[in-house]
Amino acid sequence: MPVFQHKKFDGLSIEELHALFALRSEVFVVEQDCVYQDIDGKDPKALHIIGKEGKELVAYARIFEKGIAYSNYASIGRIVTSPIYRGKKIGHALVDYCIAQCKKIYPDQKIKISAQAHLEYFYNKHGFISSGKTYLEDGIPHVGMILTTDSDE
């Protein structure tokens, strides 16, 4: 299982920054065949969650306090696992780590995500429930989901 840590933007090394942009591009742009503006200006405001096996970045996400992605919610986004590390429950460990960090750093803020619709069941396992209708984001069906549990599972 990877070692997870969180860093502010200015705490990321050049190598880590390159690795996270490369992983996001590999999955969200190339693998999912989705042309969109990944570098959206929000990275400097994010807390970056990185999961490493040795020196290799194998999982990544970013979290925001309330008011950045959603006006009334903290949020988790850009949740991604390296394709060669899938099937090892790393995605579940990543989401659990992100939820724990949100609750620790932003204790009074509810958490919302914009999930790819085909991953709704995956996020249900972590206590998220759908809120609203499915919508297209960058040509991919998404659904808003809100964390409904107060447990630290």
Image (tube, helix red, strand yellow):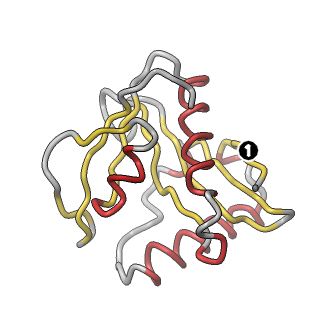
Q: Residues within 10 Å of mark 1 (few under 14, many from 20)?
A: some
Quarter residue 141 falls in: bottom left
Q: Is residue 15 left or right of residue 133?
A: right
Query: How far across and how far down the image is residue 89, in percent?
Result: 61, 57
**Quadrant (top left, top right, bottom left, bottom right) of the C terminus:** top right
Task: Count how many numbered circles sit on residues in the image.
Answer: 1
Residue farthest along the left direction in this orientation: 133
Residue at 26% x, 58% y is: 142
Asked whether the viewer can see residue 21, the reply is no
Asked whether the viewer can see residue 78, the reply is yes
Q: Nearer the viewer, residue 131 or 29?
A: 131
Q: Is residue 109 left or right of residue 87?
A: left
**Quadrant (top left, top right, bottom left, bottom right) of the N terminus:** bottom right
In the rendered image, the vertical position of residue 21 relative to residue 95, given as above or below: below
Residue at 66% x, 71% y is: 85
In the rendered image, the vertical position of residue 67 relative to residue 95, given as above or below: above
Residue matched to label 1 = 5
Residue at 72% x, 65% y is: 57
Residue farthest along the right direction in this orientation: 54
Residue at 61% x, 32% y is: 101
Looking at the rendered structure, the secondary structure element under dot 1 is strand
In the rendered image, the vertical position of residue 33 relative to residue 43, given as above or below: below
Q: Is residue 142 left or right of residue 78?
A: left
Q: Is residue 82 left or right of residue 99?
A: right
Query: How far across and how far down the image is residue 131, in percent?
Result: 21, 39
Q: Nearer the viewer, residue 74 or 8?
A: 74
Query: How far across and how far down the image is residue 32, in percent?
Result: 40, 79
At label 1, the amino acid type is Gln
Query: How far across and how far down the image is residue 69, in percent?
Result: 37, 41
